[in-house]
Amino acid sequence: MLIEVNDVQYHVKVVGEGEPLLLLHGFTGSGEDWTPFLEDWKNNHQLLIVDLPGHGQTQCPDDLENYSMEATVYALDQILNELKIESAFVLGYSLGGRVALSFAMTYPSRVKELILESSSPGLATEEERLDRQQRDNRLADRILEEGIQAFVDYWEAIPLFQTHLTYLSSEQRARLHVSRLNNSELGLANSLRGIGTGVQPSWWENLNQFEVTTTLIVGQLDAKFVKIAEEMFRLLPDGELVVIEDAGHTVHLEQPEEFSQTVQNILHNRKDD
C-alpha cells in the first residue's frame, strides 16, 4: 500500500498477525530485504515493512527536506497513525537502525522495544560530522554523474562488505546486486545528503538517559561497528549486546538463521544468558 505523508508516497507492506514489528532496511536496500524472514516472524507479529525515502517503491522527491531524519521519523509516526497502531517493536539495520533509534528518541511511547543491527547513534563531534557531510556530498555527486550501475559496483567493493565474498554464495551476491540496482540515482544521492550520518542528530549524549529497552546486534568481523556497539552498550541503561560470530556488517545476510532466531528470542523475551 501507499501512505502519503507531507506529499510523499511511502510504500508500506503489512504481513502477519500479532504485536506490530516495524522493519527498516539499510542504505541501497528496500523493504524486500526482509523477505527471507517473513515466514519465521509473521505468525507472532504483524510486520510493518517500510521503504525509506529514496529507496524501493517509496517516492523520490526532489526536496532534500523530505529525506531528513526529522521528516523521516515524523513520517513513521504518521504511518503508525494511519495503520491505527499505538506502538510497535522496531528493528533497523544500518541506515534503518539510525532511523529506528532516532524514531525511539523522538517518539519513545511509540516503541515497545528496539533492535539495532550494525548501527550507530551518529557521530559525536562537529568535526566528524562536517567531514562525513563532505564525503557523502561527494559520493552523491558521483552517483548522479556516473549512474547507478557504476555506483553499485563501487559500493559493493568497499571494505565494509568484503565478508560477502566469504559468507554469501555467488547467487546471493547476484540477487543483492540486482536489488541495489532497482534504486534510483536521485533517491540514493538525496538519501546521502538528507539523512546521512553527518547530517542526522547525534544521540551519543542521550544514550545514558534512554529508557527504551535496546538490543544491539553486530557481526564479530565488523570491527568498526563492534566498537560502536560496545560503546553504546556501556551507556544504555537497559541494553543488551549480541555479537554474531562469522559475520560482518550484514549479519542478516551472512548468518540468516542465527539472526532470525536471535530476533525471535528478543521479541519473545527468551534472551540467551
Image (tube, grey):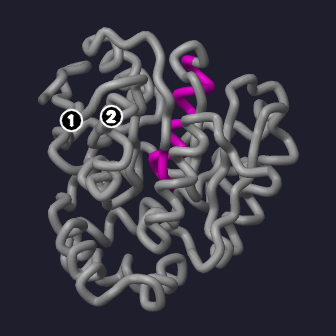
Residue 199 placement: quadrant: top right
Q: Disc 2 vs disc 1: Cβ atoms closer than 8 Å?
A: yes
* Magenta stretch encompasses residue 227: no
Lower sequence index among marks 2 and 1: 1
Q: Nearer the viewer, residue 228 or 89?
A: 89
Q: Nearer the viewer, residue 174 or 64?
A: 174
Tell me which amino acid carries mark 2.
Answer: Leu
Q: Residue at x 48, y 45 (%)?
A: 92
Q: Is residue 28 left or right of residue 88?
A: left
Look at the magenta stretch and give its main secondary structure. Answer: helix
Q: Residue at x 32, y 52 (%)?
A: 34
Q: Nearer the viewer, residue 247 or 222?
A: 247
Q: Which residue is mark 2?
A: 47
* Quadrant of the frame with the N terminus: top left
Q: Say whether residue 56 is visible.
A: yes
Tell me which amino acid carries mark 1.
Answer: Lys
Q: x and y percent of residue 8 in the render?
A: 20, 28
Q: Which mark is residue 91?
A: none
Q: Which mark is residue 13?
A: 1
Q: x and y percent of residue 60 in the render?
A: 19, 43
Q: Is residue 65 left or right of residue 105?
A: left
The magenta-colored residue range is 92-107
Q: x and y percent of residue 110 in the render?
A: 51, 17
Real-space Cα distance between discs 2 and 1?
A: 8 Å
